[in-house]
Every structure is written in structure tokens, then in C-alpha cells.
Amino acid sequence: MSDIVLPDRLRDVAEPVRRIRTPARLDYVFMAGKATSRFLNAVAEKRLVGQRCPVCRKVYVPPRGVCPTDGVPTEEEIELPHVGTVTSFCVVNVQFYGQVMELPYVSALILLDGTDIPLMHLIQEVPADQVHMGMRVEAVWVPDEELGPTLESIKYFRPNGEPDADYETYKDNV
Amino acid sequence: MRDIAIISFAQTHHARAIEQENEVEMLQPVVVDAIAKAGITKDRIDFVCSGSADYLAGMAFSFVLTLDAVGPWPPISESHVDMDAAWAVYEAWVKMQMGKADIALIYGYGKSSPGNIRRALTRQLDPYTLQPLWADPVSLAAIQARSALDTGTVTTEAMAEVAARSWRSAQDNPYAQLKGDLAAADVLATEPFVDPLRRHDCAPITDGAAAVVLAAGDVARELCERPAWIRGIDHRIEPHMLGVRDLTTSASTAIAAAKAGVGDGPIDVAELHAPFSHQELILAAALGLGDDTAINPSGGALCANPVMTAGLVRMGEVAQRVIDGTADRGVAHATSGACLQQNLVCVLEGE
């Protein structure tokens, strides 16, 4: 840090205060809301559910209760398959604080079949340099006794062996 | 200057905690209600402006998530203030004066229940000397009340009467959180909470949302039989450091009131955003309100105080009374910051 040049009237100050430390902490109890609660409770039962907008017919997962295009409640619940298509991804090579994954690993946007918005999750059981857009993947769940209302109930997604999806099927979500 | 009016108002049934719903689920029905009461569809809205605070949600850019309530597609003209949504009305009013919009939707929401509002609000204070003390808004208001009591600006009895009158008035307000047939003596019989404040002197912790629709000139006349015209609107701010202010008066409110033209005619109704009873007395004096003005017929912030929203509710409550013909000329006030630091004054009038 460069030296501080004080104005003349402050020259008598023995030692300028260069920094102070004021730790702050605020705690919150996150409220998922009705729609996301239904989604999370379904995940605890090893199910994936989305919600369909009555106007534009798009299916959102995880649902937040209101269609972001039409501003109307999305109340129709849709049972979803556990397979989808990678629409985009990144390979994480950089260490960061609090990291639990071994490097390198792949974080991807996955468009579950029958939905209109991709879900973010990990891709495993495949070398990072082989992950690509259009890759078909399936959810790998934790053991039943470890299931809970959290997306950590899905350990990761892995290739399910199907041929790549046609670009046309996910081009709106890239 | 263009004529601009509030033509509709909607709000939630305010509650200590709306636990079942997230912010957008709480807000969306209110937005729909305000748009429906304006007699329009959302494609007619030229500008959307909202007020909320990330410190309540505990999440950065939380207002982007609640925009879902508006259905912002095709892309819309939109803005946000990290303030009470009364200031979002001001921004929209400026935009409409510039001729950039004829119809505007303004909403505010605040869920205080996920966090600790008394701790969260300390983050708006000076970061070097006051934040490290976690000087919370109730304690700071108590210091203000003590100053006002010691200088004789207010009395304990007058404060209790404000609290009791607010609770009695709120009995007619289906949206109020607290209400009851209370007398000043009942308030005075309770123990101090943060001395000299009793619990009834302090606004409750509230979850809630509200929305209004603004319209300009002939569009307002076409959509609303009796629009609540904004005849004057102004906001002023005082220094951040409490020590340099006279806490027993509200200089910023007095200037805003003069600029907004509060004294240019009789005031039937005043909705004052006073989260503490002594603040209503300070505000009424700064606004020059007399006995012929009904103050806080809704019960005011002492009976429901959704943060970032209660000021907008004051505007809505006055506007609603003009729209339904029970008032001809009213004043709405909103506040922000510690001890009435910043104040907005709006004069609303029927034709």
C-alpha cells in the first residue's frame, strides 16, 4: 500500500488508521415457497417434478411458482424422467475455497426430457474432455437411506449411452 | 408538468410471517390485482419499477427473481430501487414527466421473516462507528424518543394515544397485521420494551407486498372515474451521522412538504410512515397537520410494517380514499433510514 499523504491540519495525528476490522454476520432461514417445496419433497422420494405454465405451456424445473414469461401461477405438476441432454457445460480446473470435488470436474446445464429450462448439475463417470453439448445423460441417485429434500440427493449425472440429441431439440436452451 | 395519478392499489394481508410462499409467490397475486383494478392488461404497461432489499432476502439481486411476477416478456422497460417502493413511484413519476411512459406499474415487497430485521437494518448505518455497534433501529428510535421527551416535543401520553388510535383504526383495515380496541391507558399499563418505547410504540415485524398503477393525463381519466392526482411530490435526506441531526424535528419532511405544496389547501387524510409512535408526532408537526386531518386511518406502520413497502402502502391508502370519493385531498409520507433520515411527501387530490 502506498504511503498516505495527510493534509496539513492532520499532520499531528500520530499514526493514521489504515484499516479497521468489523466482522458482520447475518443468518437467514431460507423459505423455498410452495412450488419449490413440492419439488424438493419429491426429490426426497427419488422423483423429479416440474410445473407447467397454463399460458405458454412451458415446463419449469425446479419450479418457483410463477411463469417468468407470463407472470401467472404454474400449478399443473408434471412428473419428469430422470434423463436429459447436456445443453452447455464447463470444466472446472481451478481450486477454490470450500471445494469438495476432485479436479478437474464438469458442471453442466441439463435439459431434462419434457422440460423447457435446464437444471445445473455435475457430470461424472466420463473423462472431462469427452463431455459435449447434446450428450444424453441420466441421474445417479444417492442410496435410498440418504435421500432428502435437496439436489444433493442426485450424486451426479452420467452418460446413458443413447446417441447424441439433435441440436434442434435443445437449441432454445443454449 | 404532466398530470399523473394513482389509479389502482392492491396489497397483501400483512402478517408476521408468510412462511408458505416465497417472495414471488407472495407478490404475484398483488401485481395481478393492481393491474386488474386498473382495468388494463399488462401489455399496456410502459414502465415497471420496484422497491425491495437484498438484505431481507439474504440474496444478491433478489429483485430479479421476483420480476417473474410481472412476466417480463417480451422485454420490458424496468427499474428497481433498493429503497421503499414509494421512491419507485417517484422514479416512475419522473419518467412519466419526461414523456417516456403513460402507464407504470410500481410494486414493493419485503419479507422480514427469513432473517433478523433489527440486525439487517444496522447495515445501512455508518460502517466505521455505528455498524460495529450493531446499533439497531429500535434502539436508535428509543434515543430519538428520549430526546423528544426530554425537550418536551412529545409526551409519553401522546405517544400512547398514537399507538392506541392506530390499533383502533386498524380494526377497519382487513389488511392490517395488528388491531384492537385499545385505549392509551392500556398501552401505558404495559412494561417498557426498549425504554422509553413500549411494544405498542414500535411497528411490528411484517411480511407483505403492495402495488399501484400510475397513469398520465387522459389515459388516467379513461381508466379511472376519479384518479388520485399527484399534485406534488418531493423527497429530502438528512446527514448519515445521527449526532449532527436534531432528532426531535424532521427538517427534511418540512422542506419536502413545502415543495410538495401540503399547505396549499386543506388535508382530509394523511398516511404517515411512522414505524414508531413518537415519529408520527414529529412528522405531523413537520407537515403542519391540524385537528381536521385524519391521520393513519389504516392503522399505519404501527399495525403493519412490511419493509420497503410500508411507504408505498401509505400512498396507496390515501389514493384509494381519493379514488373511492371518501377524501378530496390527502398527503402520503414515506421514510427511510434511521430515525426518519430520509422522507418523501406526496400530495394526492381528486378532481
Image (cartoon, coloured by chain):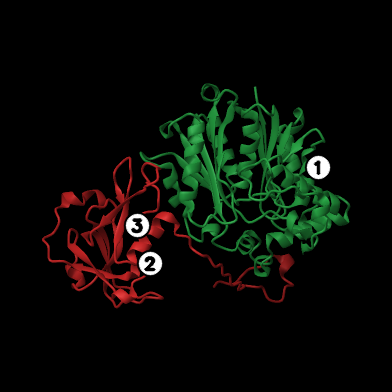
Chain colours: A red, B green
Q: Nearer the viewer, mark 1 or mark 2?
A: 2
Q: Which residue is depicted at the point 42% across and 47% down?
A: B68
Whether marks 1 and 3 lie on the same chain = no
Q: Nearer the viewer, residue B80 or B138?
A: B138
Residue at image mark 2: A149
In the image, taking residue B348 as reference, residue A84 lies left or right, namely left
In the picture as drawn, the residue positioned furthest to the front comes out as: B181
Q: Position of residue B63 (x, y in %)?
A: 48, 51
Left or right placement of residue B273 versus residue B84 in this view: right
Residue wearing tag 1: B285
Label 3 is placed on what type of residue? Answer: Pro
**Residue B282 seen in the figure:** no
Q: Residue at x 78, y 42 (%)?
A: B284
What is the three-letter code of the residue carrying label 1?
Answer: Ala
Q: How many marks?
A: 3
Image mark 3: chain:
A
Q: Percent position (x, y) of residue B339?
A: 72, 54
Other residues around mark 2 within 10 Å, as few (<14) / some (14–19) / many (≥20): some
Q: What residue would you read off at disc 3?
A: A62
